[in-house]
Image: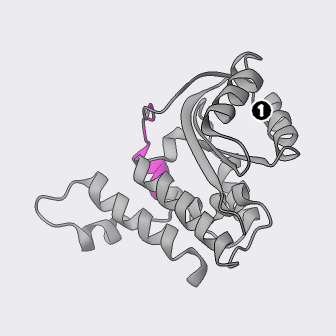
Amino acid sequence: MKKFNFIYFFCSLLNKQKAEETIDILEKKNIWIAIIPCKIIINKIQVESAIQLAIRDFINEENRAKKINIQFLLRFFGEKQIVRVFEKLSKITDSSICMVAFYKDLSRGDIIALLNELFIQKKIIRELTEDQICEPSLEEIKKIYNISDKEIEAITWDDAGLIVVLTKLILERIALAFLK
């Protein structure tokens, strides 16, 4: 099996319906896109971990989803069922997003040009940047990952901040998603 390549950007979503239509068109060209609201991204490590695990799942033929972008969403949310992922996504409104693109047969430059043509020029998103523009909502993140204050207290040490503790708990959930 040929390994997937990936690229991810942060941007502002201007038209969700057109984005979904464009994502469907890209799938026919073997480009799979996932969109994550920024308010539930605590840092890039969270995104990169879910990407790497989803790709590994496909390489090892341990994937639960038929499409890599759906496998990524399962990993990102630490869920076994895509229905639960879509339920969680439907409750989050945020125009700032992270767009993850998986592809096989194109170069990185070709993907950037294609995303620019199909998303930016058609005013579906505004400006792709590799800089994390997310302003995470810690309460939303705790809710999405079912992290309780007691769990946070149990693993917090004197100099560890909330972001560090939440990151560790989230990475655990992403890694162990299919063991539940």
Question: Crowdedness of circle 1 by 10 Å Cα count: few (<14), some, many (20+)?
Answer: many
**What residue is drawn where x is 15% and y is 67%?**
157
**What residue is drawn where x is 56% and y is 58%?**
51
Range of magenta residues:
133-142
Can residue 180 be spotted in the picture? Answer: no
Where's residue 91, x and y in %?
Answer: 66, 47
For numbered disc 1, what is the local secondary structure? helix
The N terminus: image quadrant: bottom right
Q: Quadrant of residue 136?
A: top left
Residue 92, above or below 45: above
Q: Nearer the viewer, residue 56 or 91?
A: 56
Where's residue 26, x and y in %?
Answer: 82, 40
Q: Single out the residue that lies furthest toward the left.
A: 158
- In reply to whether residue 136 is colored magenta, the answer given is yes
Residue 25, above or below 51: above
Residue that label 1 marks: 19
Can residue 126 be spotted in the picture? Answer: yes
